[in-house]
């Protein structure tokens, strides 16, 4: 069995022989000085993946770390067996940790994919151009209706009071991807109200802006106004860029500390998010944003970019060690 306290004292003695402080050894191994302290006091044991680095730093073999003492050139059969048992125990522990981590990662990825699938299946797909697909007409009894000439599965109406023109009715017509796949979406006729009660009826959101469908004075129903894209994503961009710049400043100021790798990984996350946000928005510049689709697209791209960063950073570390 591995004696953690014996191994810890052995590491401490070797460190002192080389006139190294705990922090200096920790910097060489790219771990915290608290980790080195735990090893030397027997409250912890180095991970099997770091044994080779420790052995190289202290000019000993990994077998000597496991045994907690110098090993003579000739080993007895019992010593070899004990070392093999200790190595097998550490390998099993590492395998268990990696298996648990892989299970948790798989569960998290599956949960994300499930949520994205549900979001996309139930996300409204709006009529992009209501020119021929959506018209407003006045019936003989004074009722105003909207006639939809393409399949939709739902609609919403909201009234907003504008000081300059009074109440305005906003109509949203949409279908969901689930209804489109199952063929449940169908054309509808929507009652908007009485012509004496309506000031203006707008379709929201239309391609590149809201579209005017009805006004009592007979104004061209498609002579609408053009509106700017929604601004919430601009705020996300500002926050993402702000966190990225903060992380870069921290990297510059703390470049010689043991926290550099952690800061770098934390900084990479808002950076990947900001780049993903800009790339996704660039594909729909000037158009009305569909939040669920944008959010899922940004999330997926952020994860992919961050995983790419971790892979490249891991390759860089291995190349640097070699």
Image (tube, rainbow, N blue to C red):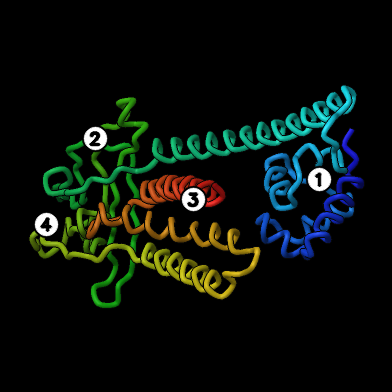
Q: CA distance from mark 2 to mark 1?
A: 65 Å
User: Tags 3 and 4 in contact by the CB under 8 Å rule?
Assistant: no
The quadrant holding residue 62 is: top right
Q: Which residue is mark 2?
A: 151
Q: CA distance from mark 3 to mark 2?
A: 53 Å
Residue at the image position 25 percent from the left and 77 percent from the top: 164
- Which of the labelled discs sits on residue 105, or is there none? none
Residue at the image position 34 percent from the left and 66 percent from the top: 231
Q: Earlier in the sequence, mark 3 or mark 1?
A: 1
Picture coordinates of residue 68, whole percent (x, y): 87, 43
The quadrant holding residue 38 is: bottom right
Residue 17 is at least partly visible in this image? yes
Q: Which residue is mark 4?
A: 222
Mark 1: which secondary structure?
loop
Q: Earlier in the sequence, mark 2 or mark 1?
A: 1
- Which of the labelled discs sits on residue 316, or is there none? 3
User: Tags 3 and 1 in contact by the CB under 8 Å rule?
Assistant: no
Q: Which residue is mark 1?
A: 45
């Amino acid at each position: 069995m591995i004696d953690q306290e014996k191994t810890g004292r052995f590491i401490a003695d070797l460190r002192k022989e080389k006139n190294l402080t705990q922090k200096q050894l920790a910097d060489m191994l790219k771990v915290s000085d608290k980790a080195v302290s735990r090893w030397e006091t027997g409250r912890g044991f180095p991970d099997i993946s770091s044994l080779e680095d420790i052995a190289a730093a202290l000019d000993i073999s990994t077998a000597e770390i496991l045994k907690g003492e110098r090993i003579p050139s000739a080993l007895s059969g019992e010593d070899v067996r004990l070392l093999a048992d200790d190595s097998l125990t550490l390998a099993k522990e590492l395998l268990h940790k990696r298996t648990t981590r892989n299970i948790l990662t798989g569960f998290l990825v599956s949960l994300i994919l499930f949520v994205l699938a549900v979001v996309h299946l139930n996300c409204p797909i709006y009529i992009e151009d209501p020119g021929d697909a959506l018209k407003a007409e006045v019936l003989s009894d004074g009722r105003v209706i909207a006639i939809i000439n393409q399949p939709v599965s739902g609609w919403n109406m909201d009234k907003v009071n504008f000081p300059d023109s009074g109440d305005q009715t906003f109509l949203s017509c949409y279908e969901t991807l689930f209804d489109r796949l199952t063929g449940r979406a169908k054309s509808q006729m929507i009652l908007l109200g009485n012509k004496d009660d309506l000031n203006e009826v707008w379709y929201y959101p239309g391609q590149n802006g809201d579209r005017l469908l009805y006004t009592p004075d007979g104004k061209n129903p498609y002579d609408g106004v053009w509106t700017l894209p929604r601004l919430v994503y601009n705020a996300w961009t500002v926050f993402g860029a702000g966190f990225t710049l903060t992380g870069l400043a921290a990297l510059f100021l703390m470049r010689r500390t043991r926290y550099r790798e952690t800061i770098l990984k934390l900084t990479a996350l808002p950076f990947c998010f900001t780049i993903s946000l800009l790339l996704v928005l660039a594909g729909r510049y000037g158009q009305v944003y569909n939040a669920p689709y944008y959010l899922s697209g940004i999330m997926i791209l952020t994860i992919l970019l961050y995983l790419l960063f971790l892979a490249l950073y891991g390759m860089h570390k291995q190349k640097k060690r070699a």
